[in-house]
Image (cartoon, rainbow, N blue to C red):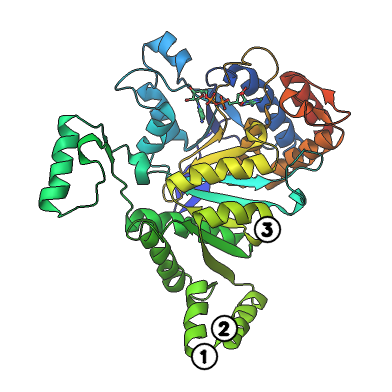
Amino acid sequence: MSQNIQFINGKLQVPDQPTIPFIEGDGIGKDITEPSQRVINAAVKKAYGTEKKLVWKEVLAGKKAFVQTGNYLPDETIQAFQKYLVGIKGPLETPVGDGIRSLNVALRQTLDLFVCLRPIRWFKGVPSPIRYPELVDMHIFRENTEDIYAGIEFMTGTEKAIRFRDFLIDEMGVDVIRFPESSSFGVKPVSKEGSERLIRAAIKYAIERSMPSVTLVHKGNIMKYTEGAFKNWGYTLAETEFTHQTFTWKKFREIELEKGVEEAKTALTKAKTMGKVIVKDVITDAFLQESLLHPFDHTVIATMNLNGDYISDQLAAMVGGIGISPGANINYNSGYAIFEATHGTAPNIAGTGKANPGSLILSGAMLLEYLGWPEAAEHIYDAMEHTFSKRKVTSDLFSMMEGATLLSTTEFADEIIRNIH
Ligand code: NAD
């Protein structure tokens, strides 16, 4: 009998047959959802027999919701995610028109899903533009609720833009706006609370999985009080809340200044030997280069919204692209989590059988790990790797692989299921 997941004393309590709400999604959402669920079901069955199973419950959003209810994001859908805590979704088209928000953003904001988690790993056989893709194991924690994404923008020439400009010039003494008459404006709110909860989740994730480091990626050399503050708050948080489990580059620099570089290096080596998580920071542009040249230097990456957006796509491209890149939006304080295909609705291939269901399937594997069912997730990872290593792929990867066999969306899912068995 299906039951609800609960969040008690900071921990998920997962029954053997949890109800999992899902949004099919627009465009290729219809193509990838059912095959993905079959793969996930097969993995759960292989791991736990009849003892455990997911009970899927469809909830509406996007075009399907609009056609059936006249609303792109019905209240019942939000209420279902609140009731059942953990769900999964296909891609949703952003409705065109003034005053209609992105449905993805609306879901993230309403449920305050402050972490966008994107694990980046390579599967043997998948074409990669980098030399050692097998060394890539990165986990991006992108802040999901703040930054320039808050949407505080004023279009040049509007009354609000003029008032905002005059306020900056007349009351704040700003004299560096190069073309004040024709400027639009955007505001970038970055808070201590928002930064700390994201960085706290990233450090905990690294500690729980015995991962070697957390990299704070920021552009604090230019934006000192937003991105620079993010870095500083991060270091302070690591040193105060995780004193015994972390060693920071800030500490390294302090020792270096006080006692010299050799002492600092010794302290760093000792911390590594003790299994402490090394908390470091890298400027965003340098990180984009470093992650290509030395991906093995970074494991967990904590960053703000806009940086996280760019970084996620670059790192995804390093291991096979958005077709096989999973993701999740999570609030670690309430337990709410929505796992999702990270690509869009791909209208150019919808209904053709060309869509790669990999992103949604791997998001399902992340969901299983989040529920505390890692055995089932492992079956998915193993079977996926086996399928790629036999060069059986969908059209997005087919053109990049010599001697590959082209499979449709459904055939690819069936092949994974065969490999699970
Ligand atoms: P897109 O991801 O839909 O497509 C970009 C390219 O990647 C296309 O060539 C597409 O065919 C290909 N592609 C994407 N997913 C694929 C898959 N699983 N298998 C094979 N090929 C795949 O991005 P877009 O065209 O910029 O956006 C289309 C719509 O999707 C827009 O309305 C956008 O707002 C929405 N969108 C939604 C999400 C989401 O729901 N999380 C994310 C991004 C974009």
Q: Which mark is residue 259?
A: 1
Q: Quadrant of ligand 1?
A: top right
Q: Which amino acid lies under the numbered mark 1 shown in the image of this protein?
A: Lys
Please, which residue is most extreme toward the front here?
178
Q: Is residue 225 left or right of residue 372?
A: left
Q: CA distance from mark 2 to mark 3?
A: 23 Å
CA distance for labels 1 and 3: 29 Å
Mark 2 highlights which residue? 264
Q: Could you tell me residue 120's position as x and y percent?
A: 64, 46
Identify the residue shown where x is 69% and y is 22%: 35
Count neighbours of disc 3 (C-alpha within 10 A) and say few if under 14, some if 14 to 19, many if 20 or more.
Answer: few
Please say if 262 is above or below 153.
Answer: below
Q: Of helix, strand and loop, which one carries label 2?
A: helix
- Residue 394: x percent and y percent? 75, 24
Q: Which residue is drawn at the image coordinates 21% and 41% (left, top)?
A: 180
Q: Residue at x 41, y 70 (%)?
A: 236
On the picture, is 257 further left or further right than 384?
Answer: left
Callout 3, which amino acid? His
Q: Amino acid at mark 2?
A: Ala
Q: Are marks 2 and 1 in contact (CB under 8 Å)?
A: yes
Of 152 and 243, nearer the camera is: 152
Residue bearing the label numbered 3: 294
Asked if residue 192 can be seen in this view, the reply is yes
Whole-percent x and y of residue 173?
15, 55
